[in-house]
Image (cartoon, helix red, strand yellow):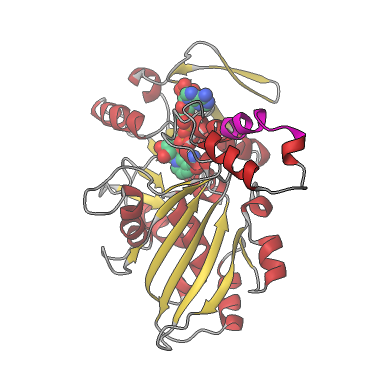
Amino acid sequence: MKHVGIIGWRGMVGSVLLQRMVEEDDLHDISAHFYSTSSAGDPGPVIGDVSYTLKDAHSIEALAEMDIIITCQGGDYTKSIYPALINHGWQGYWIDAASALRMDEKACIILDPVNRANIDRAVEDGIKLFVGGNCSITLSLMGLAGLIKADLIEWMSVMTYQSASGAGAKHVRELIAQSAYINRYLSSEELATSGSVLPLVNKVSELINSTDMPTQSFGAPLMGSIIPWIDSDLGDGNSREEWKGEAETNKILGLPAGTIPVNGLCIRVGVIRCHSAAITLKLKREVNEAEFATLITDAHPWVNYVPNNKEESVSKLTPAYISGSPQVGIGRYKKMALNNEPIYSVLTVGDQLLWGAAEPLRRMLNILLGRV
Ligand code: NAP
């Protein structure tokens, strides 16, 4: 029976991962071990009638007992622990949600509905480092898999609308706290619909910018606003999140760097869960909506095509509708009026905690265990 270590299980990604593993009965016939960076020795999760005690996530000896490690603890943890474990002589499989090792030449980025052949080849070649992709890229590729398989994409501009939970547990709490902070100062009379709305708008704008607004995690208000920068500043006009777009897309697809140019802006929005991306696509030829719908829906079972009309877009292509679902929605497909070139717009919406994070990790475990 394989020993499988799970690190980061109480974080945003880890808690969804654990929920999915329990739902899909992934813990059967393995010996699961839960680790913590902050409370080793304390009680961990209770699953069925088993109560787990937390092991020390900083103990190389305790980690080295595992055949497979799945970590959603974050990049700093990966950077400090993974090299130490390898130097210790550990030869197990490391499955990671963090970006730290994604572009390592020995790493395979995992997104099996899109690149299962690359994953199988990596396993056969003895690769032991498997890393989930950036959540926005992963969800865009899940939506566009049919176009990718048909080799129809010349370039992409990806404008993201990324949810607060994409930044982690503390951040999504902060967005909810910001909303609660504003609500605390509003009376039912002020919220009533009669009279001018301007005093209400002015008061809320002042509250959003007040120094008492909780902004410790994000560093800026998100409720009623946007944050137009995600991850570090590369100093060339791009954020690291934006740089990942092209680098990871081509690596996931097994293409030489830069084969499909990808660029855009990555924006944090006041959404609780689910990342959206408005994508401008230059295709290699004209593809009408009917052909697009067929290509997209034939690619894999986790994509839902939403016809480009107001009623279905408003009801089925939103974070509110898609949160918690493994189906990635794709719609708003239309040809853009740009010199009659085959340039199209499309919107993808997907739960970044599922296909953007937890799902590829648990499926990689199942691939290594020969279950899928
Ligand atoms: P997170 O919610 O901040 O959790 C990471 C760790 O923070 C937890 O395992 C926990 O470790 C510790 N922690 C400290 N205070 C906590 C609190 N109040 N509640 C819960 N955990 C707390 O981070 P995450 O969003 O899951 O991201 C983990 C990794 O996955 C990152 O590298 C991230 O870039 C990547 N990722 C995230 C997403 C996403 O949508 N969030 C998507 C794709 C990839 P201990 O239990 O050991 O203290």
**Residue occupying image coordinates x 62% and y 40%:** 20
Taking depth in this image into account, of 225 and 288 the one nearest to the observer is 225
Residue lying furthest bottom in this view? 340
Q: Residue at x 47, y 83 (%)?
A: 337
Inspect the magenta stretch and tell me whether residue 185 lies in it: yes
In this view, 271 is above or below 41: below
Q: Main secondary structure of the magenta part?
A: helix
Residue 121, image x and y in percent?
37, 57
Quarter occupied by residue 25 = top right
Give left or right: position of 159 versus 88: right
Q: Position of residue 314 (x, y in %)?
A: 68, 63
Residue 302 higher or lower than 294, as above or below: above
Depth check: 127 or 110 in front? 110
Quick check: is 232 in the magenta stretch? no
Residue 173 in the image: x percent, y percent?
56, 31
Q: Is 191 on the left-hand or right-hand side of 231?
A: right
Q: Nearer the viewer, residue 273 or 3?
A: 273
Q: Residue at x 44, y 51 (%)?
A: 267
Q: How many numbered discs sit on the rendered protein?
A: 0
Residue 3 shows in this picture? no
Residue appearing at x 60%, y 76% in the figure: 293
Does 346 sit above or below residue 239? below
Report the magenta residues as a range. 176-188
Q: Quadrant of residue 96?
A: top left
Q: Is residue 352 left or right of residue 73?
A: right
Let me know if residue 118 appears in the view: yes
Figure quadrant of residue 182: top right
